Amino acid sequence: MCQVNLTRRQLGRYAALVSATFPAAGVAAYETGWSLEAEAASSGLAVPMHLELVTVTDTTATITWFTGDPTRLDEFGRPRPVKAPGRVLIGTSPVPTRWTEVGRHAATAYHYVEITGLKPGRTYYWRAESNGLPAIPTSLTPTQPIAGAAPFRFTTLRPPPGEEIGRVAWLNDLHFGEQVAGLAYSNAALPGGGIPAGFPVDPDHPYWRFMGQGAVRDAKRRGCTVLFANGDLSNESEKGALGECKRTLDAFGTLGLDPRRQRAGDDWIRPDGQRRYFVTRGNHDIVRDVAGHRGLVDRFDDAFSAGFDRGSQHFSVSVGNARARYRFVGLDSNDGQTTGVLRASELDYLDAELSRGEATIPLFHHPASAAATLTTIPPLLGALPPDNAQRFRRLLGRHDNVAGVYAGHTHRTSLSRNVETGRLPYFEGGAVKEYPGGFTVVRLFEGGYMVNFHKTRSPDARAWSERSRGEYYGLAPMYLLGGLGERNWVYRIDARRRERATSR
């Protein structure tokens, strides 16, 4: 391994060069395929860059970065990966000489360090290094000071009060069967398959396969009993893609509730019980423009009908213990003619489920917040129509037991609030299948819940997440990653059981 010593000025010049490569990536990507074999490490300058503090819980933190040679660009116009050793230094003092080394690891281009044993509510100072060089933060999301300035710091979360009563995993936008990544608008007639030009799949080693499998494995490893896959499980509802996605999710647990218990009116999932998963439909999970059919054709129900209430495409399940529970209500944001709409029947169903009285989180694929309406651009990116979204929010405003709203579709991590519902959080989850490449763990407590986004950890996933950050003309980090507080946060609500909700 080539060992280098850079001055601060030189390091800044390399950082600028790295940033300048972003726009080239999205343009060049569609011209050639990509495979892991192309990621063979080469000797040369190993500059640590793309540093991201991804996850901060009450006792852990996860930091990722990349080492590459910005003087040698690959066919995508990006620095070639170079293996280098790495470590993180961390301490509760801003003085670096008092920091402790953690996460020392062997040479790799895709660095992932999870720090454990931290204390809740405490501020930590830290630095990530490779070859003795401090890693450069992701340039398009400057939430941390530049290298050489004041030390980086974060404060661990404080968990909500009461006992932890369960863990659930939120996954969305798996896109099994997809042929091109990074398309906001798909159109085979356009160069690169749409807008912007995308990254074609390696047919022998498709990214959606190892990203989906890795997320499911990690969700199990992190102790989740329930998994919600919130829409766009497939590319265009292809039978083979839906089947492979279901087999991948089956590796987590059983689809839907036990039919015998469900017939008896029992929809309660115990935190120490059998692992189960549930799905919602996204716009990619129905087929458009099928000969002989008007509107939309549903093939999704053939694979996943066991997870829905009979005769519907929605579900309602309760997770927790005998003292406190959370209800998750999965809705279908598609109808027979279009996508991105909550029908009156879905809103009526949600209204009835909210009346049960448990702390309730609705989930469906398309965002319903005012922020999503303002920051999405149909037809490239879409949310619920403004009037439909406002009807939904007004419904929530009539109940005092709503605990949050979870959506996908935008492929970004985002957290917002709305006038109609006060401090209620509206969360959009980052995509499983591409940068930032991960899923969300929700730890349920009697007095609230903690949300943490995790990048998928496998070597393949780390390599593809780094590669796919070049999507959207290299602007993916700016739009998709979100702020640290959007990926990691706590919401307090009394989840102790009561007979009925109180309407406002």
Image (cartoon, grey):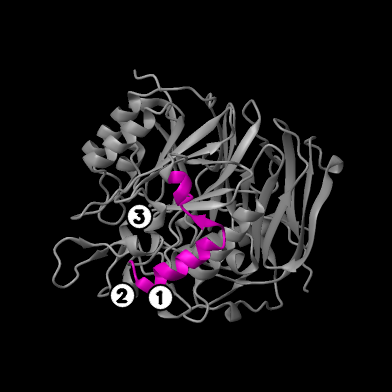
For label 2, count other residues whose C-alpha is less than 10 Å away and answer few (under 14), some (14-19) or many (20+): some
The quadrant where residue 398 appears: top left
Give the position of the N terminus as an image quadrant: bottom right
Please say whether residue 243 is one of the residues in the magenta stretch: yes
Bounds of the magenta segment:
237-262
Q: Of label 3 and label 2, which has the lower sequence position?
A: 2
CB-based contact (under 8 Å), mark 3 and mark 1: no
Q: Label 1: which residue?
A: 30
- Identified at 78% across, 44% down, the residue is 90
CB-based contact (under 8 Å), mark 1 and mark 2: yes
Cα distance between the residues tagged 1 and 2: 8 Å
Q: Secondary structure at mark 1?
A: helix
For label 3, count other residues whose C-alpha is less than 10 Å away and answer few (under 14), some (14-19) or many (20+): many
Q: Report the side of 433 relative to 399 (left or right).
A: right
Q: Amino acid at mark 1?
A: Tyr
Q: Label 3: which residue?
A: 281
Q: Label 2: which residue?
A: 191
Q: Report the side of 292 relative to 490 (left or right).
A: left
